[in-house]
Amino acid sequence: MTTTTDAAPPGANPPDATAPSADPPDTARSGTPAPGTASPDTTPDATAALKIVPARHYARWTAAVAVLVLLAQFAHGLATNPVWEWGVFRDYVLSETIVQAVWVTLQLTAYASVLGFLLGTVLAFMRLSRSPVLQTVAWTYIWIFRSIPMIVQLVFWFNLSALYQELGVGIPFGPVFWSVDSNSLIGTIGAAVIGLTLHQAAYAAEIVRGGVISLDQGQLEAAAALGIPRLRQIRRIVLPQAMRAILPTAGNEIIGLLKGTSVVYVMSIGELFYQAQVIYGRTGRVIPMLLVATAWYVVLTSVLSVAQYYVERRYARGADRTPPPTPLQRARRFLRDLRAEAAGGRPAVPPKSLRPLQALKPLENAPVGDGR
């Protein structure tokens, strides 16, 4: 028996055992460079030559263009629509009647805010008390005054003399030593302040209680172990730390109260909205007078928002030792950097967020230790 093999064609070179195979090895197919060789795609020159293509956010751009178009249409309507009557707006926005009405609005807001938060703080600690009587009374007060609309409370206090013609001081269920007529004791402004204060106290109590219970109870236990009196614990430990949690909600509540004072128009008190109503009822200029009231409310709420920002920043010092710069500080830094760039130099003060990185820069070229 004979075995046949494939014969090479005449003139062909014999195969070389050391020649590389036509099929690339697995490492070549997988893209992994062979040991001892460097891939040209990972060299610094090749990496620097790569084109960086930023991400394209078409939906975001479309939404931004749509919003800008709507804002442009609104601004065009404000400037060209004759119904706004900007001349009437200029005549009344700083008139003596409107300025006096703004002062009445600020007075109502200040009185109701201070008295409401004082009473609300007392109610909050009554709810946190171990006495079931105090807890029940505080909870009932908050439940009732949060359930009744503000306008109903104001009308009720305005008609208090219908229930009690006289208010006096004496022994409970006994003789009265001193009495006074209700209408002479509680006028229109007094009834409005009472109604706003009692309504505000119900919400302020929950705001203060939420800030107090957010504290770590271990601090109170440590203060009690040191023998610090309970009242001093509240005044020196609890309230200063709870203010960080109380202030944001309290600021919003005061801003809401400022706008809520417009409800007292039902009592014929000359605050901002009531006077605007009186003027447009006499002149028929409804839109410009409503615009006058709107402009004043926007200015007053903006001032309160700025004050809230700085008060929150002050009480955040214990938690944030390096608070972010204020808008005024950012504007000053921006102008300083612009002047420095215009003069041909670098900005004098780097951005605050980059300072930690700049402080670590000298460590990049530092010699590496031996691990000891």
Image: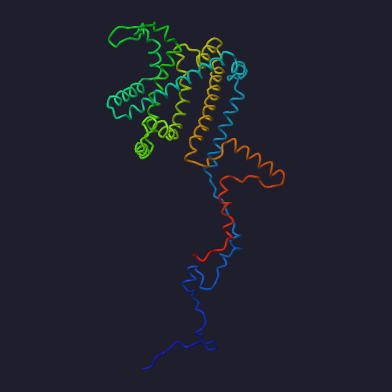
Quadrant of the rendered image containing residue 364: bottom right
Query: Between 179 and 291, which is closer to the camera in this rendering?
Result: 179
Task: Residue at 47% x, 39% y: name it.
Answer: 318
Task: Residue at 51% x, 70% y: name it.
Answer: 33
Image: 207 above or below 51? above
Q: In this image, 80 relative to 216: left or right?
A: right
Image: 20 above or below 351? below
Q: In this image, 292 relative to 207: left or right?
A: right
Q: How is the image coloured?
A: rainbow
Query: Between 206 and 282, which is closer to the camera in this rendering?
Result: 206
Query: Between 311 and 89, which is closer to the camera in this rendering?
Result: 311
Residue extending furthest toward the right: 343
Q: Position of residue 314 (x, y in %)?
A: 51, 34
Q: In this image, 367 relative to 183: left or right?
A: right
Q: In this image, 207 relative to 94: left or right?
A: left
Task: Residue at 38% x, 16% y: name it.
Answer: 153
Q: Position of residue 281 (x, y in %)?
A: 52, 11
